[in-house]
Amino acid sequence: MSAALTPGNEAAIAALVAEAARHAEPIAVEGAGTKRAMLRPVQAARTISTRALSGITLHRPTELIISARAGTPLAEIEAALAAKGQMLIAETPHLTTLMGVEAAPTIGGAVAANLSGPRRISGGAMRDHVMGIRFVNGSGEVLRSGGRVLKNVTGLDLCKLLAGSHGTLGIITEVTLKVLPAPEASATLSLPVPDLETGRRVLSAGLGSPFGVTGAALLADAPRALLRIEDFSDSVAYRSEKLRETLAEFGDAEIVPDAESRALWLAVREATPLGAAPSDAIWRVSVKPTEGPRVAAELRAAFDAKLLLDWGGGLIWIAGPATEGAHAAVMHAADRGTFTLFRAPDALRAAVAVIPPEPPPLAAIARRVKAALDPAGILNPGRMRAA
């Protein structure tokens, strides 16, 4: 990939894109480049990075809103929110260790990839909290959608369209996000289980209880079910004990206290328990939680997969050999859900489908949207599907 251009403002990005569009010249789009090993490699003469577009442009704690330029480090936003007792709702993962990078991920990249962590099951996905967005389309035009208030219904909702588009529809320059107060305390019920199916049933029982579980993960080696409760200290203590009683039929759960609980879920957020080796390929599979143990069993039989289950068993992190055979096994196991090739060598990413094919009606809509926002097809060509 070519050295990245780092324009310092939105107008400069728009001018570069307009010039590239006139010459039908492909552009690779990135923030800090921390997700380069995800999805398909992009072949482009030039790379435009938004990392110089940095800084929080608005934070109204009483209105639960924050706006920031796309290149703002995710950690900077988290720190600013924490200073006011607030948090990003989607518990967005950084994944620097998993991706083998040192650069700090940006908020624009997190939105473009629609990355969500363990709190996804209770708080929703990253795209659900994007209230407003500014971006440069493939013609070099600056567009905006949404605004800076929670009750916002003006214009076309392009926010959800850009979230998860991986830079193929536009270059995000600024985002506005809804935030929430951070919980005062956290506790985790940790329960060893004999197998993943039993663990899935434990998670289901916890999520179906009235005690407000905000995290439900399953460690696959020496299987252990993890259920998180967050709130005010007294409420967490009471609800943790009640949930422990509810789960008594499965065994005696340990209650992991606040600091240890937070560290545990930080590890789950970053997929650290997966234990992926640097040479491993990494996939994420999303299925119905009841399908999680079946998928895990199939993949262990196919190539002795390393596994971590989140979102009540419905999100499965997988690490294994970076081969087309292993990838085919993941695709087969995820036939009733969806998959993403999250990290792999360029040769594998270029040779296989990194996400499932779209049904023809959806594919037709996607082509029309792409033609409207990037008529010359210059933005991250081939990033999600072979061009």
Image (tube, grey):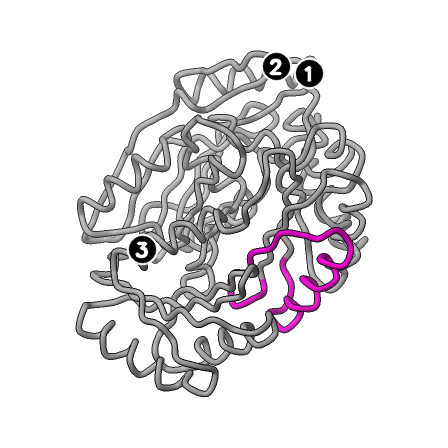
Q: Which mark is residue 262?
A: 3
Q: Nearer the viewer, mark 2 or mark 3?
A: 3
Which quarter of the figure is the N terminus placed in?
Answer: top right
Q: Residue 227 carries which label?
A: none
Residue at image position (26%, 38%) is: 58
* CB atoms of marks 3 and 1 within 8 Å: no
Judge by depth and name the residue closer to the eye, 65 or 114.
114
**Amino acid residing under circle 2:** Arg
Disc 1 target residue: 25
Which amino acid is tagged 1? Glu
Q: Residue at x 46, y 51 (%)?
A: 126
Magenta-drawn stretch, dominant element (helix, strand or loop): helix
**Residue at image mark 2:** 46
Alpha carbon distance from label 3 to label 1 = 46 Å
| Magenta-span inclusion, residue 142 | no
Task: Residue 220: name its quadrant.
Answer: bottom right
Mark 1 touching mark 2, by CB under 8 A? yes
Q: Is mark 1 on a helix, strand or loop?
A: loop
Q: Estimate the x, y position of residue 61 in percent, counting from the top left.
A: 20, 49
The quadrant where residue 367 appears: top right
Nearer the N terminus, badge 2 or badge 3?
Answer: 2
User: How far from the left and from the top, in percent, is residue 238?
Assistant: 23, 79
Magenta residue span: 286-314
Mark-to-mark CA distance, 1 and 2 = 8 Å
Which kind of residue does numbered mark 3 sit on?
A: Arg
Of mark 3 and mark 1, the one earlier in the sequence is 1
Indicate whether 332 appears above or below 106: below
Name the foreground residue: 228 vs 170: 228
Q: Pointer 3: residues within 10 angstroms few (<14), some, or many (20+)? A: some
Task: Identify the mark nearer the N-term, 1 or 2.
Answer: 1
